[in-house]
Image (tube, helix red, strand yellow):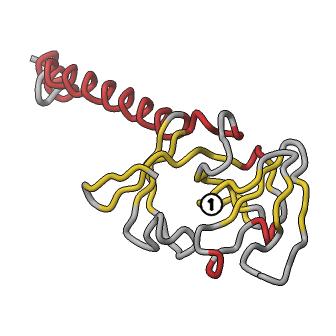
Amino acid sequence: MHFVHLYRSVYPFGKSAYILMLKTASYAVRVGCCVHVFHRSIYEVTETSGESMMPTINYKDDYVHVNKFNKLGRRCQFGDIVVVAKPTDPSQRVCKRITGMPRDFVLIDPSDPHSHDMIQVPDGHIWVTGDNLSHSIDSRTYGPLPMALIKGRVVAASLGFSVRKV
């Protein structure tokens, strides 16, 4: 009688229910780990805000699809839109277009018709600008960005279920 009472206090819903709960919890932890690794290292969908990439990316309610295989500038090229860590606050990220690769000569401020100042992008760096120059804080402010700040390349943007290639 004492054993039955002890058994019921340890497994009030039955041993098979606890085994099922442990298996379910184990699968949930595994799936969570896989999702975390996938999101951190392979692919990410993240919301955007700000006017710097208009009209390519809307200033709100738009989501960008980021390929993380292009982290650190791997296989990035002129014209790609990338997500980079903000140089003044690495905890924040910004979305900009690559307008200069290492050793390229770029016009520092193409929005100023009277400025003809150029800079050569150093090795291991990129020059990025927003598509909407009048509302963008980019390499014109930061200078050339180290490729180590690249978090991934934007492959698409979406508004709701409408996905478009960028």
Horizontal side of residue 6 vs 123, given as left or right: left
Looking at the picture, which amino acid does disc 1 mark? Lys
Q: How many marks?
A: 1
Residue 157 x %, y %: 41, 55
Give above or below for 63 relative to 58: above
Residue 17 x %, y %: 14, 24
Label 1 crowd bin: few (<14), some (14–19), many (20+), radius 10 Å: many
Residue sitting at x 11%, y 18%: 4
Q: Quadrant of the N terminus?
A: top left
Horizontal side of residue 156 vs 101, given as left or right: left
Residue 15, located in which quarter of the rendered image?
A: top left
Residue 60, located in which quarter of the rendered image?
A: bottom left
Residue sitting at x 87%, y 53%: 121
Give above or below for 100 relative to 38: below
Give above or below for 104 relative to 76: below
Residue sitting at x 68%, y 34%: 74
Q: Mark 1 highlights which residue?
A: 96
Q: Secondary structure at mark 1?
A: strand
Taking depth in this image into account, of 91 and 97 the one nearest to the observer is: 97
Residue 135 x %, y %: 62, 80
Taking depth in this image into account, of 36 and 121 the one nearest to the observer is: 121
Residue sitting at x 46%, y 45%: 44
Residue 32, located in which quarter of the rendered image?
A: top left
